[in-house]
Image (tube, rainbow, N blue to C red):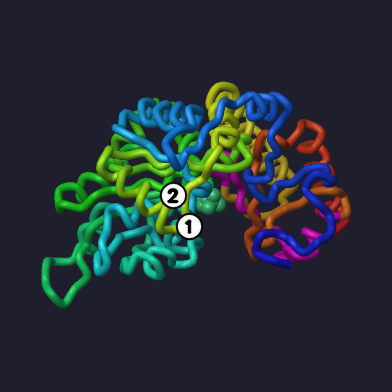
């Protein structure tokens, strides 16, 4: 079983009742596909795709930053940003469970010559200002140059409060560092915080947002920041493999998501809560709940047996151990959620 929940099985996500492995499992719906088909496109390498340009300026305006650039993935968007902020021999400070440190194949070091100083996070997923301060190196030829603080929100579904964002950003800025926010699930964060986009964006110089997680778009991330930073990130995008041509078909999906799908994130969070409540009532095991995600350790500590039982019932859950990740998203139907709860009930009552 792979970490990502058995990608080697023959069963496709479309043929199962409910796929809880990730909020990347959504497929574009009919209305989104229609918007993609109707997109006005041009060659974005020439800067001539009007739909891409609309998406970029829409997010820049929403986050009150000067500019934005459309990227194929969150990983590329983060890396292009890190390489725009940092030169070779510079160092980022990053929470040790954060995606940039754990799940991006050390691209910052491999391709950017950037050193990663990973620091422990607090129970809520935030980095503490004291730990950030302690991690900042003095200017000495022996040391890497501390250049950038990398924050994340949400972190494994956990929503970092604005106070924690502000406190961490402030110590970094006071020490002359920049701040990057991996906001792959930026809209889940602001939905759960009940704040405006700008209130969260205030605490970072650059923000990477994924349109393909929870919002229903098939592909795409947007990096937002100052004009100078985004100009450098465009160059880095080229270095990292190039830019896309008629990418307006993808930008149209992202714009459609911004127009229509944001309110549905509340439903995903409520569904995560409902699933957590049902598991708690069954006494099924330990649960950590945050926004649209649950990390669930079954009481028999046998996630593989549970995964097989759930797969037999047409439910796919994460491949992690001992805590299984389950992510609620817009393609989880009411029937799918009911079937999931029923399948858990049958597993934990037969035990
Ligand atoms: C927090 C976070 N950041 C960045 C990424 C990378 O996004 P992508 O898969 O589009 O490269 C992910 C992907 O799951 C993520 O969860």
Query: In this view of the protein, can residue 173 be seen by the observer?
Result: yes
For the point 83% across and 54% down, which residue is it? 11
Image quadrant in which you'd find residue 108 = bottom left
Q: Earlier in the sequence, mark 1 or mark 2?
A: 2
Q: Does the magenta stretch include residue 296?
A: yes
Which of the two residues, 242 or 141, is positioned nearer the viewer here? 242
Q: Does the residue labelled 2 lie within 8 Å of ligand 1?
A: yes
Task: Determine crowd level at label 2: few under 14, some 14-19, many 20+ residues with C-alpha closer than 10 A.
Answer: many
- Mark toward the viewer: 1 or 2: 1
Residue where numbered disc 1 is placed: 241
On screen, residue 298 above or below 74: below
Q: Give the residue number, with chain letter if any, for mark 2.
A: 77
Q: What secondary structure is marked by label 2?
A: helix
Would residue 328 appear left or right of 188 to someone viewing this image?
A: right
* Left or right of residue 351: residue 178: left
Task: Give how far across and how far down residue 261 sits, in percent.
Answer: 60, 26
Q: Distance between the residues labelled 1 and 2?
A: 12 Å
Q: Where is residue 66 in the image (x, y as percent from the top left)?
A: 29, 32
Residue at x-position 68% and y-position 45%: 25
Residue 160 can be seen, yes or no:
no
User: From which residue to which does the magenta span run?
Assistant: 289-311
């Amino acid at each position: 079983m792979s970490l990502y929940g058995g990608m080697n099985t023959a069963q496709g996500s479309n043929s199962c009742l409910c796929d809880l492995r990730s909020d990347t499992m959504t497929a574009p719906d009919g209305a989104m596909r229609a918007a993609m088909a109707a997109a006005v496109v041009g060659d974005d390498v020439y800067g001539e795709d009007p739909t891409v340009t609309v998406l970029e300026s829409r997010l820049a305006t929403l986050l009150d930053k000067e500019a934005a650039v459309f990227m194929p993935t969150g990983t590329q968007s983060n890396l292009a940003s890190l390489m725009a902020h940092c030169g070779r021999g510079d160092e980022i400070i990053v929470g040790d469970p954060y995606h940039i440190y754990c799940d991006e194949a050390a691209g910052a070091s491999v391709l950017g010559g950037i050193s990663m100083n990973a620091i422990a996070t607090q129970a809520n997923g935030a980095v503490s200002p004291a730990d950030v301060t302690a991690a900042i190196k003095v200017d000495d030829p022996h040391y890497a140059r501390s250049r950038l603080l990398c924050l994340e929100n949400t972190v494994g579904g956990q929503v970092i409060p604005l106070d924690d964002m502000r406190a961490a950003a402030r110590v970094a800025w006071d020490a002359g560092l920049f701040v990057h926010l991996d906001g792959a699930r930026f809209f889940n964060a602001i939905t759960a915080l009940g704040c405006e986009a700008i209130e969260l964006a205030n605490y970072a110089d650059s923000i990477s947002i994924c349109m393909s997680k929870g919002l229903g778009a098939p592909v795409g991330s947007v990096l937002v920041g100052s004009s100078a930073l985004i100009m450098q990130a465009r160059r880095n995008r080229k270095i990292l493999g190039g830019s896309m041509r008629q990418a307006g078909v993808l930008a149209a999906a992202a714009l459609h998501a911004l127009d229509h799908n944001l309110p549905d994130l509340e439903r995903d969070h409520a569904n995560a809560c409902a699933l957590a409540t049902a598991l708690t009532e069954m006494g099924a095991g330990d649960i950590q709940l945050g926004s649209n995600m649950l990390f669930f350790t079954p009481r028999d500590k046998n996630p593989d047996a549970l995964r097989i039982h759930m797969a037999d019932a047409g439910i796919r859950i994460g491949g992690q151990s001992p805590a299984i990740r389950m992510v609620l998203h817009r393609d989880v139907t009411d029937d799918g959620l009911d079937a999931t709860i029923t399948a858990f009930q049958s597993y934990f009552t037969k035990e």
